Image: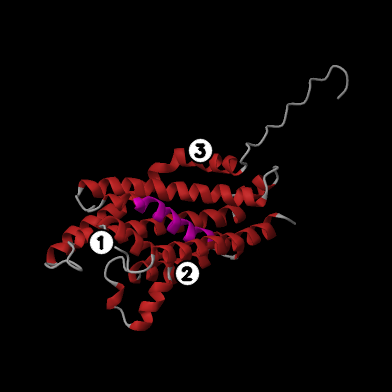
Amino acid sequence: MTRGEPPAPARPALPRVPALAVLSYFLVGYRRTWRSGAFSSFLLPVLTMVGFGLGVGAYIDQGVDGVRYLDWIVPGLMASTALQVAVADSTWPVYSNFEWAKVYFAQGATPLRVGDILAGHLLYVLFRVLASIVAFLLVTALFGALRSPWALAVVPVAGLVGLALAAPLFAYAAVVDSDSWLAMAFRFAVIPMTLFAGVFFPVESLPAALRWLAYATPLWHGVDLCRAATLGVAPQGSVVGHLLYLAAWVVGGWLLAHRAFRRRLIV
């Protein structure tokens, strides 16, 4: 700096947790666009609950396992909503941030590390999932479909389900060379998982081979935990086993996503 020149502006300091800077970026954008996502993340699941729970449920006299069909299907829809929100925010948005909007590259040009960028966006996805589930839970309570105070446990379980799907999908969206692969993930993974993971009918009614495929999906573990929580009964599987399995998806997905992000952002 020469004499007479004003001092250069100080470079803004990152917060102590740099990932929060990334989270705040996405929250600012969400504040402007939340209305456009309200239907898919909240109203559509509620309409599905009314249509299936009350409409179809009116023709199921005995319910399922002695439980009114509305009460039985609601926790599955909550877990499925967590999946749908997480998938929607972990496919095209991630691909766009690499290929179209280049947001990740702009963030990578700052002192942010790859892990900060990845963690901040995953925190945003977690926020979206939790916000949708809390709203869904409140509406469900108005319908009288919650039979246990343990229903509050649905919120953290849904968050874990969302991360278990989001983390590996971040890795997938970071390596595909066309957004057509994202549509294929919906058709051949997300939709079958939603239909056959115990959301709408018991997995035990499936043939043995398909049943074990359903058990392998993270969604089934979330459905079982959510259903046990809202009905106040023991889950079919071990609670610890469910949580560890979902956590394994989160950790594995994080490692794959971090590797994929690092390859794209560090040259």
Q: Mark 2 or mark 1, which has the lower sequence index? A: 1
Mark 1 is surrounded, within 10 Å at the Cα level, by few (under 14), some (14 to 19) or many (20 or more) other residues, namely: many
Q: Secondary structure at mark 3?
A: helix
**Is residue 173 visible in the rendered structure shown here?**
no
Mark 1 vs mark 3, CA separation in Å:
34 Å
Q: Nearer the viewer, mark 3 or mark 2?
A: 3
Residue 69 found in image quarter: bottom left
Task: Kindly give the residue lying farthest to the top in the view shown.
Answer: 4
Q: Quadrant of the N terminus?
A: top right
Task: Kindly give the residue lying farthest to the right in the view shown.
Answer: 2
Image coordinates for residue 39, horizontal then vertical, percent: 34, 49
Q: Mark 1 or mark 3, which has the lower sequence index? A: 3
Residue at which label 3 appears: 28
Residue at which label 2 appears: 184
Residue at which label 1 appears: 73
Q: Amino acid at mark 1?
A: Ile
Along the line of sight, the residue nearer the viewer: 143 or 240: 240
